[in-house]
Amino acid sequence: MKNTRIGFIGLGNMGYHMATHLANNEHSLVIYDVRREVLDSFEQDVQAEDILKAHSPQEVADEAEIILASLPTPQVVREVVLGERGVIHGKKVKTYIDLSTSGQKVTSEVGLALQGRGITMLDSPVSGGVPGAQKGSLSLMVAGSREAYERSLTLLEHIGKKIFYVGDEVGQAQVIKVINNLLSSAALAITSEAMVLGVKAGLDPNIMIDILNASSGRNSATEDKFKKSIINRRFDYGFKTDLAYKDIKFCLDLADDLEVPMWLGSQVEHFWRFAMSQGAKNQDYTTIIRYFEQWAGVQVGNEIDQKS
Ligand code: NAD
């Protein structure tokens, strides 16, 4: 596969690093993003010899048999794949691997449309955040044809270390991904609330996190986010509030469709909806702690606290 040109669409917080791993593993690439400046900086950063910069998703699909995409919303995924200059119109593409979190509905719709043109889709959302994308250690959950999955595994191993095959129905990987994200956003919110309480009661936040990480209260926020991006007030984890909210909504919409009660999940969704209404949309999702801090009149950590 090394001599095959790989397409990559969407070089944002996650995609940039994933595409970098492919280039560093000697893949020639054809890349596309609506932000042209990101294509130029990618070319300079990776210094790989063979990188083409496309002007549309279709142009990527004219050049590459396999395309990976990491895109923000289902609307963008639909446009990139099925739009007027979308992947579906490309001459060369045979496999489209979607690394985005786009929910089950649009993912299935896009998968079916591609299938109608003889293009195989793998639904492959990722978890592990920007640090995982940087290290190439993401976890990937993949649904779609097993044969296409096995064929693509070597490629996927450049970006992920824990790769799970979910099943042959495109869209099923989205189900476990949005369940995962409901849990991880719930963990961030409840840990923020609890950390604010501890600081209000006079505890040192770094000591609290050390204790939680050695105890039964540990979770992805205590292990990964507090020391990296919150206690030092950097708020640079790399995931925007609106993208986190989108994933929680996918999960609650799924529960709605299946008529499954979500007492606690709906509280989590409501909190994040509140954050969205307060202007947090384009901010890093770790900033949600600020609401709990304002209500309690304390701050968890400070700028000079660079322990991480
Ligand atoms: P991002 O907004 O940083 O990146 C998205 C990229 O897509 C941007 O570079 C943007 O310019 C590009 N784009 C937008 N519209 C486009 C179009 N029409 N054509 C081509 N490119 C277009 O988002 P991200 O944080 O990198 O997340 C990407 C996906 O991965 C999302 O679905 C997100 O939910 C998921 N995800 C993110 C994280 C995280 O921690 N950031 C973790 C796991 C999964």
Image: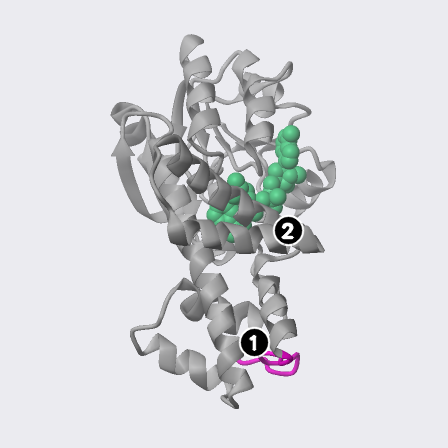
Task: Answer above or below: position of 152 versus 225.
Answer: above
Element at label 1: loop
What residue type is disc 2 on?
Met
Q: Position of residue 133 (x, y in %)?
A: 48, 51
Magenta highlight range:
297-308
Q: Position of residue 48 (x, y in %)?
A: 57, 42
Element at label 2: helix
Residue at the image point whose x is 29% and y is 73% from the top? 216
For the question of whether residue 291 can be seen, the reply is yes
Left or right: residue 3 compared with residue 50: left
Image quadrant assignment for residue 43? top right
Left or right: residue 157 compared with residue 14: left
Image quadrant assignment for residue 286? bottom right
Residue at the image point whose x is 31% and y is 44% from the top? 163
What residue type is disc 1 on?
Ile
Q: Is residue 132 magenta?
A: no
Of discs 2 and 1, which sits in the foreground?
Answer: 2
Left or right: residue 193 compared with residue 214: right
Q: Which mark is residue 143?
A: none
Within-10-Å neighbours for mark 1: few <14, some 14–19, many 20+ = many
Residue at the image point whose x is 50% and y is 74% from the top? 227
Q: Earlier in the sequence, mark 2 or mark 1?
A: 1
Image quadrant assignment for residue 155? top left
Left or right: residue 54 compared with residue 206: right
Observer-nearest of 11 and 190 = 190
Quadrant hosting ligand 1:
top right
Residue labelled with disc 2? 276
Colour mapping used in the image: one colour
Q: Quadrant of the N terminus?
A: top left
Residue labelled with disc 1? 231
Q: Position of residue 42 (x, y in %)?
A: 64, 44
Badge 1 residue CB within 8 Å of ligand 1: no
